[in-house]
Image (cartoon, coloured by chain):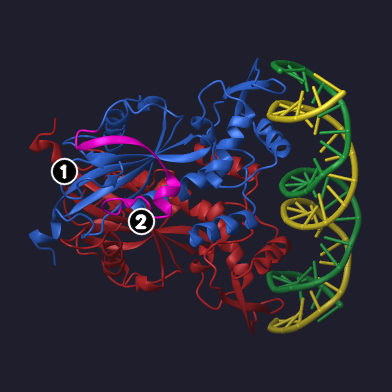
Chain colours: A red, B blue, C yellow, D green
Amino acid sequence: MRHSHDRERVAVTVDLVIFTVRDERLHVLLIERGKEPFEGRHALPGGYVRAGEHLDAAARRELVEETGVDAGQMHLEQFRTYGDPERDPRGRVITVAYLALGPDMPVARAGTDARAAGWEPVDAVLDGRIDLAFDHGAILREGLERARSQLEYTTVAATFCREPFTIAELRQVYEVVWGLKLDASNFRRKVTKARGFLVATGAHRTPDIGRPAGLYRRGDARLLTPPLLRSGDAVAAQLTTLALR
Amino acid sequence: MRHSHDRERVAVTVDLVIFTVRDERLHVLLIERGKEPFEGRHALPGGYVRAGEHLDAAARRELVEETGVDAGQMHLEQFRTYGDPERDPRGRVITVAYLALGPDMPVARAGTDARAAGWEPVDAVLDGRIDLAFDHGAILREGLERARSQLEYTTVAATFCREPFTIAELRQVYEVVWGLKLDASNFRRKVTKARGFLVATGAHRTPDIGRPAGLYRRGDARLLTPPLLRSGDAVAAQLTTLALR
DNA sequence: GCAAAAGTGTTCGTCTTACACCCATGA
DNA sequence: TCATGGGTGTAAGACGAACACTTTTGC
């Protein structure tokens, strides 16, 4: 039996987990809410899907609104929809969560509903120093897990780097997101061997000190073959680290 | 600027891609629609999320309604939300798609909106002999891709098997879902070595002909370590097979 | 014994890991 | 020339693919 109330109409939002690497640490873009509920609390950027608007389009629009960055260049992927009836005190609102990775970029403006917007260390959210509004803490954690595993099988890590970039910069992305130290020489071999991941520009960049490093651009491959796997031990270490926090 | 029409309220449904292995082929549970739109066409089982209902609960409810199977025992995972404004001719309806894998089971009843329900070979959908309503064809394809990769990293393949099961039965799941032939001896070594995947019952089952096979139950591990990877060549072969169809 | 399917052993080649070592630069 | 990070070489061991071979059953 289906009654009319079975087909409840609900509001739909998109929320964005946008990561970047800054000062050798993983950061996430957060806003400070400018109105109730959760006024003054940190939250993920996001907003209502408009009438007739695609979900992906809404996500890209919100990304531009919150950061001023053209989403056309960014990796943007839906990773889960959250629909707990109690997740928003205003009523039934389900949200489609997106993951985006990008190079460190300036925050161009505050969001429409936001008092402020800025990059915050992911650690601060994981250890409770920053307590996010709604269920955004859980969404962030799942986005982080997704990002970690995406690094294994796809070439998205390179989207964290502003072109052209060095292999050391790319390695730092892996180290920061995974929370591990990687062997520089073996890392280099793997990523240069993976077809379509990196394109050498031929140019070099001389650091403050040390030998100049070769510069690369992103290749056209989206899937990383062969994958760059975290060892089982490494994943276990990562999980316990998370649990201890 | 946000106007009231920016917060369009939309209907939300869940749709289920339910796979099973039957007669050495992969099958998917489909219904035949009993009313417009797409009356008489095949579609994925699913329905409206009710007021105050969790998305996962709605998926489990629909699964029981369509199949009579207790979803409590089944692996059920949300894999993507589809929100194209044009995807439903009746108006804006977004749908949260779930993936479920289970042993071959009888279809207990037709769904409330369905004229009939039954298992259909996945091949028939992929090659166009069955043309699904709405965007369900695309949803099915993505669900299949998800199922294929889930087999690599998780122990869900065992949920296809009715307990107790033999290693040959488990191997057949992999072969059917991946569309590949696997080496029986290497497969056995891998799955028995993976901790928490299989628990030997000690009992044996004698086939019509041949040596009796050891019987197993599912272990408590959800993640498969080490993973059981399709080789790059195998994946390529699979993709071309799909493209040629 | 034979067919068929379960299960074990072995070989060979590739990939991973760890680490030694050389290279190119600025100070 | 020294310190620093870039980059190459290489040996030991782990892992995977392929396949020969043994075991256990019904007929």
Check residue A98 in the rendering and tell me which mark sits there, or answer none. Answer: 2
Q: Position of residue B99 (x, y in %)?
A: 39, 41
> Is residue A218 placed above or below A177 in the rendered structure?
below
Query: Residue type at mark 2?
Result: Tyr
Q: Is residue B208 above or below residue A128?
A: above
Where in the figure is residue A133, as x and y percent of width and height? 27, 47
Instruction: Read off the chain for label 2.
Output: A
**Is any atom of residue A245 visible in this view?**
no
Give yes or no for residue B117 being in the magenta stretch: yes
Q: Quadrant of residue A61?
A: bottom left
Across and down, in percent, residue B81 comes to 31, 50
Q: Secondary structure at mark 1?
A: loop
Range drawn in magenta = B111-136
For the point 64% across and 42% down, which residue is it? A232
Q: Which mark is residue B35?
A: 1
Neighbourhood count class around disc 2 (C-alpha, 10 Å): few under 14, some 14–19, many 20 upward: many
Please, which chain is the residue tagged with disc 1 on? B
Tell me residue D26's x, y (percent). 69, 16
Indicate whether residue A44 is drawn in magenta.
Answer: no
Residue at 61% across / 22% down in the picture?
B216
Q: Are marks 2 and 1 on the same chain?
A: no
Name the residue: 58% across, 66% down.
A170
